[in-house]
């Protein structure tokens, strides 16, 4: 694989030694966006937590920029990978700017003091996701959508080689969903970031992704390009829909299978 990026080999994920999904093979090269889709409870978040190192693998290996993930220190991981999972962050007396600044700590010295370059990275990230006006607001006193964008700014200013996101469009209205996807596409295309995320919105996954990985059952159900995956034969079976419910022309599910035939 490329020197920077993320890969897993014969990976099994689950909890307390019990396998949920096994034999996962994945390679995410710099500049590529790979999106996990599938029904609730299929294991998308479990895969992302395992790739992030916050959940131990049951079997197999994860490689971050060519090195086994479990051989890297937390600081080494933070220099290469930024993670935005679904856990709700609870803070006390921290501003939104404080939260974003935390993304720079892997790049600071032992004292954790931000220099001018760090502050410039924080400012750029906050402007990119349109939260600069929230800088002095208490993080716990802004809306869920605003928190989501602040957390994205924190992940971006970490300047990672790999970015993992679990349902990043949650709590966002359609404008900010589109803005977020544009930002992710820019990070991939211009910064060469390797991105892995999960999405429920099929039409959004279809337009932003380079590769789709369908999660269902004890193994990966299917994977390929958006053109290959977003077809009725795959989507209907993936979500246990009546045949023909998925309409590839619109990227949505119809109420009647007759309409997509």
Image: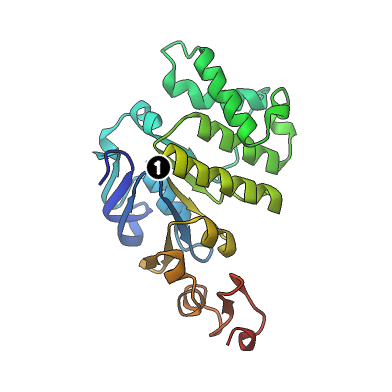
Q: Is residue 170 visible?
A: no
Q: Which residue is rendered at x = 49% and y = 70% of the image?
A: 230
Please determine whether, in this image, residue 123 is positioned above or below residue 247: above
Q: Position of residue 204 (x, y in %)?
A: 58, 59
Please give the residue where the numbered disc 1 appears in the rendered image. Answer: 52
Q: Which residue is rendered at x = 51% and y = 12% of the image?
A: 115
Q: Position of residue 145 (x, y in %)?
A: 69, 43
Viewer-proximal residue, 254 or 242?
Answer: 254
> Where, quadrant-wise, is the C terminus in this rendering?
bottom right
* Residue 202 in which image quadrant: bottom right
Label 1: how many Cα within 10 Å (few below 14, some 14–19, many 20+): many
* Residue 94 in which image quadrant: top right
Please determine whether, in this image, residue 225 is positioned above or below residue 166: below
- Give the mark count: 1
Relative horizontal placement of residue 28, taking residue 38 as reference (left or right): left
Q: Which residue is rendered at x = 41% and y = 64% of the image?
A: 225
């Amino acid at each position: 694989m490329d020197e920077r990026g993320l890969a897993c080999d014969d990976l099994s994920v689950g909890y307390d030694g019990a396998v949920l999904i096994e034999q996962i093979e994945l390679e995410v090269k710099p500049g590529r966006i790979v999106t996990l889709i599938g029904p609730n409870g299929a294991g998308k978040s479990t895969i992302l937590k395992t790739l992030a190192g916050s959940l131990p693998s049951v079997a197999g290996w994860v490689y971050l920029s060519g090195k086994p993930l479990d051989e890297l220190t937390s600081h080494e991981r933070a220099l290469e990978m930024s993670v935005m999972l679904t856990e709700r962050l609870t803070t006390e007396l921290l501003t939104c700017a404080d939260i974003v600044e935390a993304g720079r700590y892997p790049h600071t010295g032992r004292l954790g003091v931000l220099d001018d370059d760090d502050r410039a990275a924080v400012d750029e990230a906050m402007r990119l996701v349109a939260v600069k006006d929230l800088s002095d607001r208490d993080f716990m006193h802004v809306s869920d959508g605003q928190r989501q964008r602040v957390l994205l700014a924190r992940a971006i200013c970490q300047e990672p080689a790999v970015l993992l996101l679990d349902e990043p469009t949650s709590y966002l209205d359609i404008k900010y969903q589109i803005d977020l996807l544009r930002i992710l596409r820019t990070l991939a295309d211009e910064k060469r970031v390797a991105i892995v995320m999960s999405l429920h919105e099929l039409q959004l996954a279809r337009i932003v992704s380079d590769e789709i990985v369908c999660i269902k059952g004890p193994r990966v159900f299917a994977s390929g390009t958006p053109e290959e995956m977003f077809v009725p034969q795959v989507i209907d079976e993936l979500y246990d829909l009546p045949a023909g419910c998925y309409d590839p022309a619109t990227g949505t599910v119809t109420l009647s299978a007759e309409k997509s035939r």
